[in-house]
Image: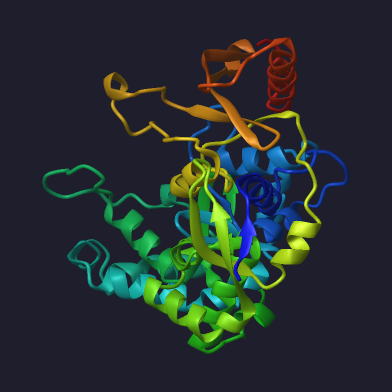
Amino acid sequence: MNIKINNKQMRQLWLKATGLAANPTGSLNVLQMIKDLGFVQLDTIQNVSRAHHHILWSRNQNYREIMLDELLAKRQHVFEHFTHDASILPVEFYPMWRRQFRRRKASMDGSSYYKTKAGPKSRAEIKARIDAEGALSTHAFDSKIKGEKKMWDRPPHKVALDYMWHAGELSTSHRVNFRKYYDLTEKVIPAHILGQNLPDQHQIDWLCQAAMARLFVASVKEIKQFWEGVSLKEARAWGLDVSQNLQHVDIENYDGTWSQTYAAADILTQLDELKTPSTRMRIVNPFDPAVRDRVRLKYLFGFDYKIEIFVPAAKRKWGYYVYPLLEGDRFVGRIELKAERKLGKLHIVNLWHEDGVKWGDNRKAKLKSELERFAKYVGLQVI
């Protein structure tokens, strides 16, 4: 018989897996947090705090933004590349990313856009400058768009830098005010890491196994989507090959229906060790690992969420940058916030309560406390 996992257990497992079950206090190890999560998504928008910083702060509120910048600049602990989006990853994962570089390079080589915008000659010239001058940002180059400018079009030097970064020829050296500086990969990635060349199947096995270890319970599609480093076909073949190391489980969805899926081999141990999540209120970033898979979020929590930054204002249901509010193992609301840094203010644009969730004095007090902590974290004095 399949193991049965009820919905409450599933919610608690997921919060444990994503690091939001425990109180966000205690000793701080930023690198270990990144390893435990697998990666931390980068995002340019600084609504209150940029996503990558907010994600880490949510798990330990002793975190400060300079800590991640220093970790990257040391060039030996983390690197930047693509999962489902631009992300920070532990540098020890780099050998498992070799095929990802090849996959992305093959995709770009098949694109007429990259062929016309960033041919071999222009890439070689940029690479030679970086080799001679050291790490450079896009501001060191001044090529212009020729002809009609189309949406999302970029100058040739940006396209060339992007190509070489995705292909693994260049790596992020460091960032200054979030501006990326590119350097030759051999100058960024430690030699003992860069020298590891593992067979493709080894990388596929590792990516699938490491994804399952961080998901606890997942379908083949969810395993594939975790890193976006394997195809659905490869993930399915892996699941069949190592099925003896996976458990077949029935899971209860938020609406009381049941689904069949897979669980990690140690799922019974994980269930035995489950603890009630912290009941403090959490302001969760829209790009947080706990909520980025909107389908999983819906079937586990019944929380229907969408980030609307790319939706025209008149068509938004909620708002521009709306944060889910987590309390215990339930999403109890959502809040739109905006930092007014010159005035030292954290502005509450709007607040919505989830259907069926009563907001008494205790819940309001929890939100007030978390808002105060969030404001203090980014140096704002007034809410």
Query: How was the colour assigned to the protein in this rendering?
Result: rainbow
Quarter placement of the C terminus: top right
x, y (%) of residue 380? 68, 18
Q: Residue at x 43, y 71 (%)?
A: 128
Residue sitting at the far right: 27
Q: Is residue 58 left or right of residue 89?
A: right
In front: 176, or 324?
A: 324
Q: Residue at x 56, y 87 (%)?
A: 197
In front: 335, or 129?
A: 335
Is 343 placed above or below 57 here? Answer: above
Residue 239 visible in rendering: yes
Residue sitting at the far left: 147
The quarter holding residue 60 reads top right
Is 308 placed above or below 171 here? Answer: above
In front: 377, or 267?
A: 267
Residue 177 visible in rendering: no
x, y (%) of residue 30? 75, 51
Q: Is residue 225 left or right of residue 380?
A: left
x, y (%) of residue 221? 43, 64
In front: 224, or 172?
A: 224
Quarter placement of the N terminus: bottom right
Is 280 placed above or below 288 here? Answer: above
Q: Residue at x 71, y 39 (%)?
A: 57
x, y (%) of residue 300? 54, 45
The quarter holding residue 232 reads bottom left
Q: Residue at x 18, y 66 (%)?
A: 112
Q: Is residue 189 left or right of residue 230?
A: right
Label count reads 0
Residue sitting at the far bottom: 199
